[in-house]
Image (cartoon, rainbow, N blue to C red):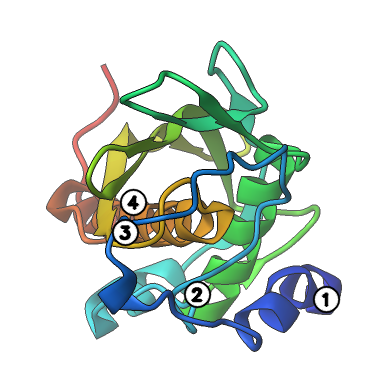
Amino acid sequence: MKLHSTVRYLLPVVSLVALSTLASGCRGGDKFPAAFPLRWQGTSDIAPDVKDDVREGLRRYSFRVAPVQDRRANPNVVGADMETGRQFTTTTNVAEYTTKFFESAFVFTGAKVVSSGETALITVELLEFDVAEGGMFNGVVRMNIHVTTPDGRTVWEGFAEGKSKRWGSSHSSENVNEALSSALKESMENWLKTPAFLDALRGNAPPPR
């Protein structure tokens, strides 16, 4: 399967990244944003930072990424101002956005991603996708990940979490997107760096309970 369309979903945004001015701190910008689209922002590279042994292990499989299941109570809410309680909302389908991120990021690790005929299926439950603005923009992405074979055998399962902290103008959708982008990327990197996952890729994982 060619994933050029998936990669194009994110990369044009990446090429237009503009970092927020640090000197602005969290001053000004009292106007609260209306619902806004999610954009990859604040980091120019979506490729996860992983070691060669992880890349080698990933190449043993052909992966299919199942549509991400958004388990959050309010799928369109992506954060809040902690002082006022007002919520940041998005016009983007967060489940579709994170699914495309997974597919694109896996391509950059050198893994083979397919639409059928996979040797491993990745199923992701999104548990947190949130930015708390309070002095800083504090992002967190947390998910439950299952990797299974076509016959249903568990290769690996566990949680992955990424966090970020960003300075920037108050109530800025750009800063929310930057914090979410960094946290999302870190969550995937933390998963791929998990020793138990590397053992699973090598075939040394204990049998599922």
Label of residue 46 in the image:
2
SS state under label 3 = helix
Q: Mark 1 is on which residue type?
A: Lys
Neighbour tally class for label 1: few under 14, some 14-19, many 20 plus, Cα within 10 Å? few
Q: What distance separates the C-alpha of mark 4 from that of mark 3?
A: 4 Å
Going from the N terminus, do you reach mark 3 or mark 1 first?
1
* Viewer-side residue, 158 vs 176: 176
Residue in front for this viewpoint, 51 or 139 = 139
Q: Which type of secondary structure does the marked residue at label 1 adopt?
A: loop
Q: Residue at x 71, y 38 (%)?
A: 34
Which residue corresponds to mark 1? Answer: 2
Say which residue appears at 41% left-offset and 50% top-offset: 170
Identified by mark 4, the residue type is Ser
Residue at position x 23%, y 59% in the image: 198
Mark 2: which amino acid? Answer: Ile
Quarter assignment of residue 81? top left
Mark 4–mark 3 CB contact (< 8 Å):
yes
**Mark closest to the chain's N terminus, 2 or 4:** 2
Residue located 41% across and 59% down the image: 169
Nearest to N terminus: mark 2 or mark 1:
1
The 10 Å Cα crowd at callout 4, few under 14, some 14 to 19, many 20 or more, is many
